[in-house]
């Protein structure tokens, strides 16, 4: 059956070294910032997934030259707001919330209306969270349906910096406003609940005048409009969110070891490691180094037989926001009842992940107690599935597909997992890496 993955056997023990493709957040940010820089920027290990290709297509439509080579990518920026495009332009963010929300920040000066569309999943997601602050800059938005794509943006000629309170812990909203600040005279001040800080680190690397004051729950960010952004080269490190599936595969497999090379371990992204270690996983960070403000290391994982439940502190939520599905799978195999709270945001992702995560665990025979913003998972260390499980991934959520695959490879049973193509959003080589772990010779 095309597009459907059948799994009948658990993975056998393995001992391997792998590389994981480039970080999605950094790849999209590099594309968008390179489009605002002056001259040729170059990226190595740029993630060649649908979300990033959609970003490259979008800036091309906005008049920016892009060259994709086998081992690197070049973007020829025309400076801040250097877009050059015809009337009636439509940009397609496909499956990518990050692209859809961030690119709007770069369009607040657009003299013509630009239409933004996305796929079925993205068209169900909330855009008011970003159009509201961007309206404060003076941009106008025209929705067909309340708060969802498709929408059109019309920019304003005179844009001034704003004060903005980001209260959801959304890096997409924070970053979109930061990109808008590049086009706004004066200072933009943001009070943002903690979330991934790649945009801040890239601004610092580009010598943009940015001040960040950190308190326990909020970051206070001031950005002064720069005159110009220099072209810049970047070597994108491996994606911790993609690595997380292999960290869990190794943790739950029998007697296995895995070394993942060169992964971004930015502290605002490694909630998954902190949480899994608290649950008894064997994870070691080796060869730590700094790269342009980011932290990078190899990750060494060994299988773990004694996993325990967790009462997960909400303070870790934002740093594990894309990894909860796969963390739920570990909770399903841990001793005791795990509790994850204040995670309503999970239902705002590519599909309602909190609800889906719970449903998949129930299909596996694992009991859960679900509310709108929390889940209790009743772990079964000796879980052994005997039946056929069919996953219909109706919004084609890449992380639902990958979580189901890891469950099938570690918990037994027969699995029919639909919508294989969904992995193209973030991790097109996911199944190739699994094949490598199965192949003794590699
Ligand atoms: C992202 C931010 C997060 C995350 C998404 C990538 C980013 O979304 O879920 O996959 O690159 O800024 P929110 O900002 O909606 O939390």
Image (cartoon, rainbow, N blue to C red):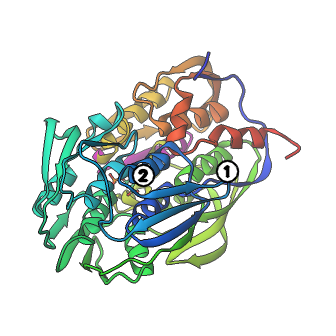
Residue on which the image places disc 2: 60
Over which residues does the magenta segment extend?
326-344
Q: Is residue 327 magenta?
A: yes
| Picture coordinates of residue 167, whole percent (x, y) | 21, 61
- Return the disc, 1 or 2, that comes first in the chain's sequence: 2
Q: Is residue 58 magenta?
A: no
Secondary structure at numbered mark 2: helix
| Picture coordinates of residue 190, whole percent (x, y) | 21, 72
| Picture coordinates of residue 194, whole percent (x, y) | 32, 66
Residue 82 located left or right of residue 9: left
Secondary structure at numbered mark 1: loop
Q: Quadrant of ligand 1?
A: bottom left
Residue 323 located left or right of residue 435: left
Quadrant assignment, res 208:
bottom left
Which residue is most to the right? 441
Q: Is residue 400 visible?
A: yes
Residue at image point 42% right, 58% down: 64
Q: Is residue 331 visible?
A: no
Residue at image point 59% right, 49% down: 307
Q: Which numbered tag is attached to residue 304?
A: 1
Q: Quadrant of the N terminus?
A: top right
Q: Nearer the viewer, residue 225 or 200?
A: 225
167 up-or-down from 41: above or below: above
For label 2, the crowd category at 10 Å Cα-Cα, with few meaning under 14, some 14 to 19 and many 20 or more, is many
| Picture coordinates of residue 112, whole percent (x, y) | 19, 51
Which residue is most to the front? 86
Cα–Cα gap, marks 1 and 2: 47 Å
Q: Nearer the viewer, residue 223 or 272?
A: 223
Residue 165 located left or right of residue 351: left
């Amino acid at each position: 059956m095309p597009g459907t993955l059948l799994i009948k056997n658990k993975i056998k023990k393995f001992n391997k070294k792998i590389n994981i493709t480039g970080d999605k957040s950094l790849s999209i940010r590099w594309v968008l910032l390179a489009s605002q820089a002056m001259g040729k920027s170059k990226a190595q290990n740029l993630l060649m997934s649908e979300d990033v290709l959609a970003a490259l297509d979008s800036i091309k439509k906005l008049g920016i030259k892009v060259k994709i080579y086998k081992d690197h990518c070049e973007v020829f920026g025309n400076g801040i707001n250097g877009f050059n495009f015809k009337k009636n332009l439509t940009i397609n963010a496909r499956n990518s919330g990050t692209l859809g929300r961030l690119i709007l920040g770069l369009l607040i000066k657009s003299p013509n209306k630009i239409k933004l569309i996305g796929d079925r999943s993205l068209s169900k997601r909330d855009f008011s969270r970003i159009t509201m602050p961007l309206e404060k800059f003076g941009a106008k938005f025209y929705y067909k349906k309340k708060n969802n794509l498709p929408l059109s943006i019309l920019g304003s000629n005179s844009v001034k910096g704003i004060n903005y309170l980001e209260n959801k812990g959304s890096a997409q909203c924070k970053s979109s406003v930061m990109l808008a600040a590049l086009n706004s005279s004066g200072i933009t001040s943001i009070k943002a609940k903690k979330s991934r800080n790649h945009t801040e680190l890239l601004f610092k690397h580009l010598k943009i005048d940015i001040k960040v004051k950190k308190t326990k729950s909020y970051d206070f960010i001031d950005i002064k409009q720069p005159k110009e952004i220099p072209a810049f080269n970047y070597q994108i490190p491996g994606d911790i969110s993609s690595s997380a599936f292999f960290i869990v595969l190794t943790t739950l497999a029998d007697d296995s070891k895995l070394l993942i090379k060169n992964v971004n371990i930015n502290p605002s992204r490694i909630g998954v490691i902190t949480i899994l270690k608290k649950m008894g996983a064997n994870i070691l960070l080796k060869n730590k180094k700094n790269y342009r403000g980011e932290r990078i290391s190899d990750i060494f994982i060994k299988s773990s037989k004694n996993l325990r439940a967790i009462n997960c502190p909400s303070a870790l939520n934002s740093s594990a926001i894309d990894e909860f599905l796969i963390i739920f799978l570990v909770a399903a195999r841990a001793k005791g009842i795990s509790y994850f709270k204040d995670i309503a945001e999970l239902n705002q992702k590519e599909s309602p992940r909190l609800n889906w995560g719970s449903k998949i665990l129930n299909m596996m025979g694992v009991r859960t107690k679900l509310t709108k913003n929390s889940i209790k998972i009743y772990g079964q260390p000796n879980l052994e599935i005997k039946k056929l499980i069919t996953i219909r991934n109706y919004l084609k959520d890449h992380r639902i597909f990958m979580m189901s695959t890891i469950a099938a490879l570690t918990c037994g049973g027969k699995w029919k997992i639909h919508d294989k193509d969904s992995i193209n959003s973030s991790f097109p080589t996911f199944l190739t890496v699994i094949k490598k772990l199965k192949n003794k010779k590699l």
